[in-house]
Image: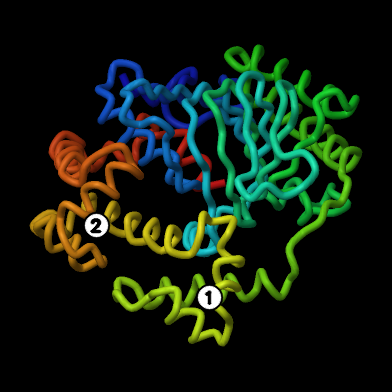
């Protein structure tokens, strides 16, 4: 079953002698539809995710998370999927962390295929700067994750804004030392106290910074002009959806560029048309789960977001999310019926998710 829990001695607030907070999320025991929906709702705290082979019914996710003072360590076993983070999402959720991940099994890669080496090998360190756009794709993987607020790590880094979607080789001495340190923390986490967590925070941050600084080689990046133009186009389209006039020709003409140039700018997003379709699908997904829109017919929601027929939405929606619009609506209703609203503020409800959002 899906589970979220905390473990600590005694009741009330956490005191220095108590063990650190723990949260478990596990889709075992859920139906395939429930597992997908539950995972999308939890990973939505920081990523727009899309599970691979969603229709096979084999997706599984298990996260064992520990709060170490004001950083979070997560031992994760997750099925393959893409992880996206757009500038729009960055501005919306306000999360500004570094996510440091050791992929012990499986791998992750950039989807824009930039850089000399774009896919991790077992033991490599994958760095995500959640304050910058991310386009990545991962296989089924076992990984050790560390979430660190920017305010804690960036002062220790020589180039704090130049690490996103970078791979640090696992055989580099500083990277190997940092990996061993995190593995040790994971082994000891169940018995660690709040005092222990406070003592290991500084060494953990220093090791992370040493690994990133020691392995930090600059790589080619896209032109700042092109990045700025792409961001402006995204803002324009998002502001004017769900209008149906956001064609390649219209947008290219509005910005005084050729259609070919537009396609080039959105190549890393699988093309302009694909990006617009995914943006529309994401809005439909949110509308279907919105308690205030439960009375709306799916056909009406489809039309409002640029899908001329329910069947057109159904095919695109299932291909992207692995669920039909009706299934998403049904599961949303079930959760609203079963969940006690006051439980959403308790430590038992998605604790690790709330930690990340609050850090």
Question: Which residue is at 36% across, 41% downward?
Answer: 41
Other-residue count near label 2 (Cα within 10 Å), few / some / many at <14 / 14–19 / ≥20: some
Query: Where residue 129 appears, x then y in whole percent?
Result: 67, 49
Q: Provide residue 6's location: percent of width, then percent of height.
A: 44, 24
Q: Nearer the viewer, mark 2 or mark 1?
A: 1
Mark 2 and 1 residues: CB-CB less than 8 Å, in contact?
no
Q: Quadrant of residue 220?
A: bottom right
Q: Is residue 234 left or right of residue 159?
A: left
The colour scheme used to paint the residues is: rainbow
Residue placed under numbered mark 1 in the picture: 259
The spot of residue 310 in percent (x, y) is 15, 55
Q: With respect to residue 159, does 106 lie above or below? A: above
Q: Which element carries disc 2, helix, strand or loop?
A: helix
Q: Is residue 68 left or right of residue 201?
A: left
- Residue assigned mark 2: 287
Instruction: Give residue 347's quadrant in the image.
Output: top left
Residue 357's mark? none
């Amino acid at each position: 079953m899906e589970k979220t829990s905390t473990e600590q001695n005694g009741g009330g607030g956490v005191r220095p002698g108590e063990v650190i907070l723990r949260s478990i999320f596990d889709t075992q025991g859920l139906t395939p539809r429930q597992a997908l929906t539950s995972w999308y709702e939890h990973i939505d705290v920081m990523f727009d995710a899309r599970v691979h082979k969603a229709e096979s019914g084999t997706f599984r996710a298990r996260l064992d998370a520990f709060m170490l003072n004001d950083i979070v360590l997560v031992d994760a076993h997750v099925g393959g999927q893409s992880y996206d983070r757009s500038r729009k999402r960055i501005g919306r959720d306000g999360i500004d962390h570094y996510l440091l991940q050791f992929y012990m099994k499986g791998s992750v890669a950039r989807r824009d295929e930039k850089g000399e080496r774009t896919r991790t090998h077992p033991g490599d360190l994958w760095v995500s700067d959640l304050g910058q756009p991310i386009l990545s794709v991962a296989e089924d993987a076992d990984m050790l994750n560390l979430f660190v607020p920017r305010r804690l790590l960036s002062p220790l880094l020589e180039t704090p804004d130049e690490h996103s979607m970078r791979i640090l080789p696992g055989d580099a001495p500083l990277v190997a030392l940092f990996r061993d340190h995190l593995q040790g923390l994971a082994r000891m986490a169940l018995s660690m106290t709040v005092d222990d967590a406070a003592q290991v925070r500084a060494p953990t941050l220093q090791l992370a910074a040493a690994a990133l600084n020691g392995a930090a080689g600059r790589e080619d990046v896209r032109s700042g002009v092109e990045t700025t133009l792409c961001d402006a186009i995204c803002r324009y389209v998002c502001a004017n959806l769900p209008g149906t006039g956001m064609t390649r020709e219209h947008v290219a003409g509005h910005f005084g560029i050729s259609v070919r140039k537009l396609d080039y700018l959105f190549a890393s997003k699988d093309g302009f048309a694909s990006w617009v379709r995914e943006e529309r699908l994401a809005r439909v997904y949110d509308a279907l789960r919105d308690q205030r829109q439960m009375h709306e017919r799916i056909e009406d929601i489809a039309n409002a977001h640029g899908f001329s027929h329910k069947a057109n939405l159904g095919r695109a929606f299932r291909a992207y999310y692995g669920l039909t619009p009706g299934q998403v609506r049904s599961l949303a209703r079930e959760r609203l019926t079963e969940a006690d609203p006051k439980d959403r503020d308790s430590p038992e409800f998605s604790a690790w998710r709330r930690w990340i959002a609050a850090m």
